[in-house]
Image (cartoon, grey):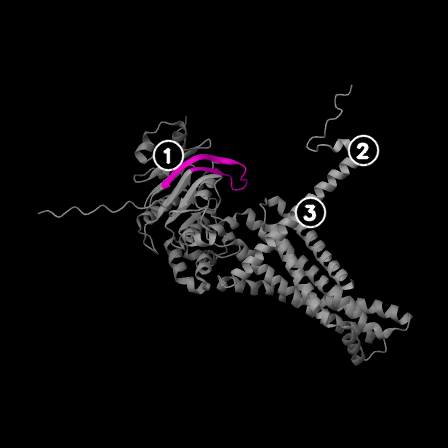
Amino acid sequence: MTAPPSPQPPPAAPLLEMIGVTVVASRNPAIIRIENLDWTIQPGEFWVVGGPPDSGKTDLLATAACLSRPMRGRHRLFGQDTRVVPTEQFLPDRLRVGVVFADGGRLLQQLTVTENLALPWCYHHNCSFDAAADRVRSLLAAHGLEFLAAQPCHRLGRPWRQRVALARALMLGPDLLFLDNPTGGLNPGQIDWWMDWLDRLHTGHAPPDHRPITLVVATDDLRPWCRPGRQFAILHQNRWRLLGNSDKLADCTELAVRELLGERS
Amino acid sequence: MDQDVGKTAPGLPGLNSLGDPVVASALVWAGQWILQIGSLLRGLIAFTLIILGIVFTRWERASAVIHPMIRNEIRRAGIRLVPIVALIAFCLGFVVIGQAVALLSQVGAQQYTGTVMVTVVIRELGPLVTALLVLAWVGTGTVIELGNARTRGEIEALEALGIDPIHYLVVPRVIGQATAIFSLTVYLVLISLLSGYLFAFLQDVPLRPGQYLDQVMIALRWEDFVLLAFKSICFGGIIAVVTCYEGLARPLRQHEIAEATTRAVVRSLVACVLVDAFLLLYLLV
């Protein structure tokens, strides 16, 4: 007698749902960047959003991460409608989202590397910087930043600032991490480090939490990101287009995609 | 036939009916100025209410981070300024007593020396001079720091980390600067009174320390203590709110920070003088 088939686990709830969303420019909400955007991010996915410079990638990530409001459309994060839930009530879920900004990560320049990492932890756990020291040390070591721990952030070079920004975004243990052009301006060796490290974060093999993280990367160069197991989308001329997995990306003949893959028209 | 008869100026319907273009342009200018003032006041009042709301509802939140920042701001805007305040206070006492003695001796009214000190230094100049010093020393720095943080995108970074920028950047400055100005005003007043007597002594004014102290005590009313505290805390709050507002409340580009700093200084100064004048009117009426 065979055992009855075990019931299929219910499908995991999406981390992010954007339906019919109009994304506006963060600096000027009167400017529309993307219209009619439909996007769902499931737990465990690795999204790569390609687009040429100034195509609205930063504004898209800002809207997705709840840093700016969409002009219209439905935006649900961890199942909650972000326009309905009061900010205070939404904060615990808001902290499950990490953001790594482009161009040096927008670190707090007057603080040291250690203080930049410790600040979000101390603010939300109401503790002194000393109390966050173990977690900070662990993240600094994992990112190869120990020798920069006491440096003020304004003295760091861009590649290091970008790494500090990643470490800072991981301080609160996010479930969903948005990265805006993290490898922009880096040399091939540094890009390899990022690719390896993001793979480890995605699969849950990275300290200190060893928990898989859902990743969303925006980039203007798709070449380093073309790997199996990832989902692709592009932004082109204010339009959002879902492409699918890496095979579909490779098969796509659209000029905008080929250009993002480094092929000249 | 003139085809333009009855047409209105672009965007300003009906103003041509006033006839004189000088009057029309003056009215346009006055109207725009009033709108700007109204918009600024609305923004400042809203910003102040948000700050007060955060102070009262989130006093205990992140106190391990915010309270040391308040202490640091008191050090920056208060303790660090004690030497310069002492110097200014010393000179202020000399100047006020010097002028007062010169005038009062002509009419044989030296017994009012202490009264003059109370009226000029405690009621008026003390809080205002201290506020000016803090505005010049710390307020300008506040606009530049916050303006730079804004242009570098640090405010969005704080929001992304779930940190309220007003709680983290503005609240410590408002509380710290208000406390610092109040404390510095007390020091300034005390040092001015002492240096005033020293000058009178050096000028051979026939006034013993006890008599001088009596004059000051008689001239002082309980309202003076309340007013001194209210004024100095109010000036501190105004300076912190206006400088933070100019640096933080709207998007700035790098080249706009210098202009924002100048604007913040002028607006803080005007607001402090207006509040001072309003309080004087209130007391006189």
Q: Position of residue A237 (x, y in %)?
A: 46, 31
Q: Is residue B264 left or right of residue A132?
A: right
* Prevailing secondary structure of the magenta residues: strand
Amino acid identity at mark 3? Ile
Residue closest to the eye, B170 or B200: B170
Tell me the chain of label 2: B
Tell me the chain of label 3: B
Seen from this angle, which residue lies furthest left?
A1
Q: Secondary structure beneath disc 3?
A: helix
Dot 3 corresponds to which residue? Answer: B37
Of the residues tagged 1 and 2, which is closer to the observer? 2
Look at the image and tell me whether residue A182 can be seen.
no
Badge 3, how many Cα within 10 Å: few under 14, some, many 20+?
few
**What are the residue bounds of the magenta stretch?**
A20-40
Q: Quadrant of residue B56?
A: bottom right
Q: Is residue B199 left or right of residue B233?
A: right
Dot 2 corresponds to which residue? Answer: B20
Q: Are marks 1 and 2 in contact (CB under 8 Å)?
A: no
Q: Is residue A40 left or right of residue B44?
A: left
